[in-house]
Amino acid sequence: MKTVAEILKEIRPEFDFTASNDFMADGMLDSFDMVTLVATLDKNYGISIQGTDIIPENFKNLQTIEALLRQCGVSAG
Amino acid sequence: MNFFFQGKRISGILTVVPANEKSFVEEMKNFNFPEARSLKLKEVMGYDKRRMVQPGVCVSDLVIFGLQRLFERGLLKREEIDALILVTQTPDHFMPPTSNIVQGKLGLKQDMVCLDVNQACAGFVLGLMQSFMLLEQESIRKVVLVNADVLSRKASPKDRNIYPLVGDAATITIVERDPANKPIHASVKMDGARCEALLIPAGGLRLPSSPETAVLQDVGDNNLRAKDHLFMDGSAIFNFVQTEVPPLIEGLLARAGVSKDSIDYFLCHQPNRFMLQKLADKMQIPHAKMPNNVVEKFGNSSGATIPIAINLNLAEAVTRGKINACLAGFGGGLTWAAMLLEIGGLSFCEMIDYP
């Protein structure tokens, strides 16, 4: 199973996501990338992230994404 | 706000789509984006084919074409039409109403009501409600409800947020009395405080179109758009739909005393596949009960997507049998509306190309 960092790297290979604390502010993810990310996370972990949770705060950095996944019952690293 | 209607039904649906088909894969080179990212978006959002009018084609052209076809085939008679409700956000003119233009060009009787309604993606449910209210009048026996938009003419070809999803279409829905049909429940909510989330800034009297409003500007995310073009705050609209629509539908079901399982189909407005899948998951509705294939075949044609979904997926079910449906429309205004009704026994449910 792919890690969150690996999935992000597939979506935007040009960035190092471990080096940023705010993907949106640093221009590494836009709203459409966020949609692609959610669809990939859903498929990868066999979950459905709630629509109301698809907000920039939850996709700010690796820690916030992993916290969101934990809410969905996934332990991701 | 809640509504209740009795003794009304839909008796026919015709969809008119422009024959001109566009392909996302061909168009994506117009956007200032890497191809690989656009292809991922295609897969998730369901962007593929869409229908777009040729330059100069207006709403009334699509509607007149469709109504003439119904007259020619004997599916509708001119003299039967007691009211013509035309829901659009892209009228031919500010004045006169586009419904009057259609009436005049088709030589319909003078003893009738023509009414334009400025509503967007909730326009099918709002239009049905208006039709049912008119049918309370003894003099009105048959209403022609039209949902039609040519929003591609207001979308920037350089705006990846809007352009790949917009489709043009007109749907013609015949609504009449039927004492035997099941009671109909509906709920509507509006929030004008959030109206700027879906907006065409210029072209009205607040900001008339001018050479300045036609200039493409860099609006971020590599998109170019003018003030004459349609703007959508995609994140705000997505969040609005996920937050507001489920409680509206659940409240409506509870008020009608109907279980989710007894609904055969949840026919929602179709902005994109991802949004509907998330809505279905949130409401714990099987994806098969909430069709989401209109955008990939025809594009998002605002208030027309619900009747198109019926044409596309359920034509046989609603002509030979009956379905219990929950309709839900949501979008510009902001407006969100839902309706529970039985749809069946239609005398026609078809789709034609224009021209």
Image (spheres, coloured by chain):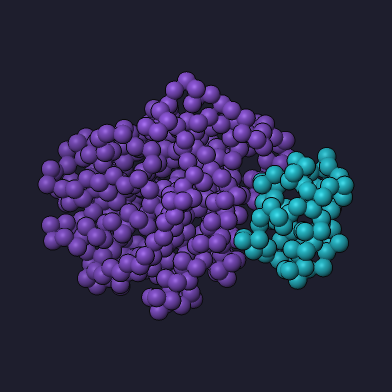
Chain colours: A cyan, B purple
Residue A33, position as x, y percentages in the image: 70, 47
Taking the image as drawn, is residue B339 in sight? no
Q: Residue at x 26, y 41 (%)?
A: B99
Rendered residue at 17%/51% (across/down)? B82
Residue drawn at x 37%, y 32% is: B205
Classify B45 as above or below B176: above
Q: Quadrant of the C terminus of chain B?
A: top left
Q: Quadrant of residue B187?
A: bottom left
Q: Is residue B317 left or right of residue A74?
A: left
B306 relative position to A35: left or right: left
Q: Is residue A60 above or below residue B54?
A: below
Q: Position of residue B54 (x, y in %)?
A: 43, 30
Residue B213 spot, x, y in % from top left: 49, 26
Q: Is residue B338 left or right of residue B145?
A: right
> Which of the 4 image quadrants contains residue B63?
top left
The front one of B240 and B355 is B240
Foreground residue among B204 and A16: B204
Image position, residue B225 (x, y; %): 56, 31
Residue for point 71% across, 55% down: A57
- Residue A12 at least partly seen: yes
The N terminus of chain B lies in quadrant: bottom left
